[in-house]
Amino acid sequence: MALVVQKYGGSSLESAERIRAVAQRIVATKKAGNDVVVVCSAMGDTTDELLDLAEQVNPVPPAREMDMLLTAGERISNALVAMAISSLGAEARSFTGSQAGVLTTERHGNARIVDVTPGRVQEALDEGKICIVAGFQGVNKETRDVTTLGRGGSDTTAVALAAALNADVCEIYSDVDGVYTADPRIVPDAQKLEKLSFDEMLELAASGSKILVLRSVEYARAFNVPLRVRSSYSNDPGTLVAGSMEDIPVEEAVLSGVATDQSEAKVTVIGIKDHPGEAAKVFRVLADAEINIDMVLQNISAVDDNTTDITFTCPRADGPRAVELLSALKEEGEWKDVLYDDQIGKVSLVGAGMKSHPGVTADFSEALRDEGINIEMFTTSEIRITAVLRETELPKATRALHNKFQLGGDEIAVVYAGTGR
Amino acid sequence: MALVVQKYGGSSLESAERIRAVAQRIVATKKAGNDVVVVCSAMGDTTDELLDLAEQVNPVPPAREMDMLLTAGERISNALVAMAISSLGAEARSFTGSQAGVLTTERHGNARIVDVTPGRVQEALDEGKICIVAGFQGVNKETRDVTTLGRGGSDTTAVALAAALNADVCEIYSDVDGVYTADPRIVPDAQKLEKLSFDEMLELAASGSKILVLRSVEYARAFNVPLRVRSSYSNDPGTLVAGSMEDIPVEEAVLSGVATDQSEAKVTVIGIKDHPGEAAKVFRVLADAEINIDMVLQNISAVDDNTTDITFTCPRADGPRAVELLSALKEEGEWKDVLYDDQIGKVSLVGAGMKSHPGVTADFSEALRDEGINIEMFTTSEIRITAVLRETELPKATRALHNKFQLGGDEIAVVYAGTGR
């Protein structure tokens, strides 16, 4: 008998009707002879409605109270799913994050799971019950206060529970039926992937794919929990994310897909004195402000005056703050100027095959050149090539790369890099 | 420095605006030099909306899951009130029933508080914080499952916390500014009461007054916690409920007020064999069905055939079920017939003064006679007289008694017997 952990997102639980449909799938999984643990997100817009209420009573609410507020959302969907299951004649038992033993760090609003002690869940499983666990939430180990896990927290809850319970698979349900080679809205002949490795999924998540949250994939890889991305609207087996790149025989190693990202902005600091430690000042001020920078590029300044320029990308949401901080240092004469550009797009080619296929970088840049697309920044990892270009050229670039590497054909070892779906 | 426990009902918290207003009152109480513990009900219609959702996924939801669902409502109002307080510059800390140490019996949906161990609340108070506790909920001592306290549960939570924390007063806030001599909608010159004893409040609650839940008054009397009924819309001191009847000097003892109740129905069982134990069968079948009966009246049957008739009142909600059960026994030949009447009204006169004023019963019946009102059932307690009559005559009867005993005048030692406000 297998132990299956299923996670359902808010869109899969947005109405009583959808909740009853999800309950039927859960009961069917149980009747198929599996032990089942279900992790639920909050219903549809519940979280946004609660955030709106909070905003009305306090524009800057205390993080602890915000967590107390938001966790009510998962409690509600949790209980409703348990009720729907029992209306189908099966036995269900719901647990809050705290009751399920999800212990976290102290940081409200963005806590990290430090331990999972699902004793009560295991007991209920042993009694043959279906267990429903509220996602996104935990309890602070020290103060026993309620905490939330930040964006995509329910995925992380599901993976962490699957690891702690030694589950056979963790199924992530949403309204997408798997991982695709590219955003089908941009590339019509994008293909769904049957399987890919944790490493490839990590690169895709880091390159703009929204289908799985980076943190949950990291957790799954660390504890080797097989993930299956599925749609709650179909019976399609979806995409399996499992195994390390090394498990893939070289001859089978292929390019996974093209990921696109329109969420970043570009900042350039001009005229930094070319002495040791000068550049570090840029990254220190950003780090102190907890601004995550992605791509970084440094080269000698155009004008030959013994200075360098540094260009980096960061989330557009943090862009203005970054410029403000760096401009302040400019006033102190640290450097000449600070430029900002939020009209950029990022396109990435991901795949284990890259290691064993020379010339991929050349093909990549030629594909864009043939379309007359200018590359503004360029970086590579062992299994990824990323270019920054004009946002307006992102669709054309994506299609060009998708064709160049024949990701459309019957090739299935490919990956969807969604844009928020 | 006094310790004040304040309980706010759902109507006082129905919007962000109302929540901000409540927060201002709380902070003002704190600034006046008091320690403050606040118990919140769920916002406005939240509970009804959750019940509606549950109905849609499962018409007969498991009680445990229903409690998990409903307790989310108080979590939400709780956190929002804490946020609103901190926006006013004061420090607040919210606690779930479980975190506040509200331990209950196992019975989901209608659990009883068995112990309150508010260690975390006391700690926060000692740190100078305002404590917000979710009402209506607790945690089952044995299984550590979330429970709810049933109707008016938040009042009980407030009183129980006040007792456990040895508070100086427990203020119950709603949209009514105190306890009145009668429903002002029926009796225009009804007067607000300054003070009355626990015993009088108990009789009023039992006689149809909805302003305080019977269980919370019982709890307050048992632990001698002074209650103050106030409006969250005004600064009126409201009505103090404290002390036992014995504390009231006889010369000050007066009649408190007239309570009305339109929630009951009358059932008459005809032709019960006049042997020991025959009547007991009636009450046994009702007790087994957990139907609470109120007034009971037994007398010799009109037709002289060695049988008796028994008439009793019970909540209209339970009426049809009671008739069904008793009719079943009728088929078995236990008795001749079962009559049902849900058009009755109950009017009660309550007051400690009754003991020391002879002739009150006579005045009572004459007042109704003068209005041509027929009394169908009649019972008395040490401090209460109750008559059952046609529901349509309830307003006229209420006014007649209110005038007869001069409860309107400048007399203030009188009591409101609300109808659901």
Image (cartoon, coloured by chain):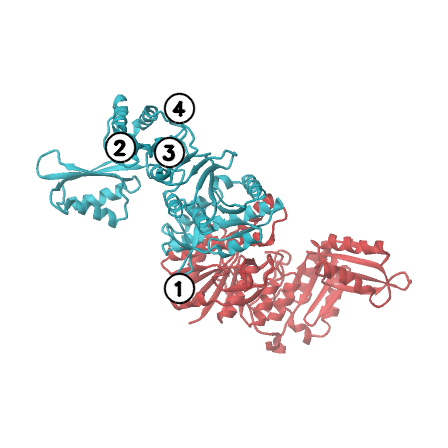
Chain colours: A cyan, B red
Quadrant assignment, res B89:
bottom left
Task: Bin the neighbour count of mark 4 within 10 Å (Cα to Cα): few under 14, some 14-19, many 20 and up.
Answer: few
Q: Name the residue under label 2.
A: A388
Q: Which of marks 3 and 4 is nearer the N terminus?
A: 4
Q: How far is mark 3 from mark 1, CA to CA?
A: 48 Å
Residue type at mark 1?
Answer: Lys
Q: Which residue occupies the extreme right position in the image?
A: B305
User: Do marks 2 and 4 share a chain?
Assistant: yes
Is any atom of residue B227 visible in this view?
yes
Residue B186 x %, y %: 64, 56
Position of B177 relative to B249 (above/below): above
- Is B17 left or right of B304, judged from the image as shown? left
The label nearer to you, 4 versus 1, is: 4
Task: Bin the neighbour count of mark 2 within 10 Å (Cα to Cα): few under 14, some 14-19, many 20 and up.
Answer: many
Q: Earlier in the sequence, mark 2 or mark 4?
A: 2
Residue A326 x %, y %: 20, 44
Q: Residue at x 10, y 34 (%)?
A: A303
Callout 3 touching callout 4 (CB < 8 Å): no
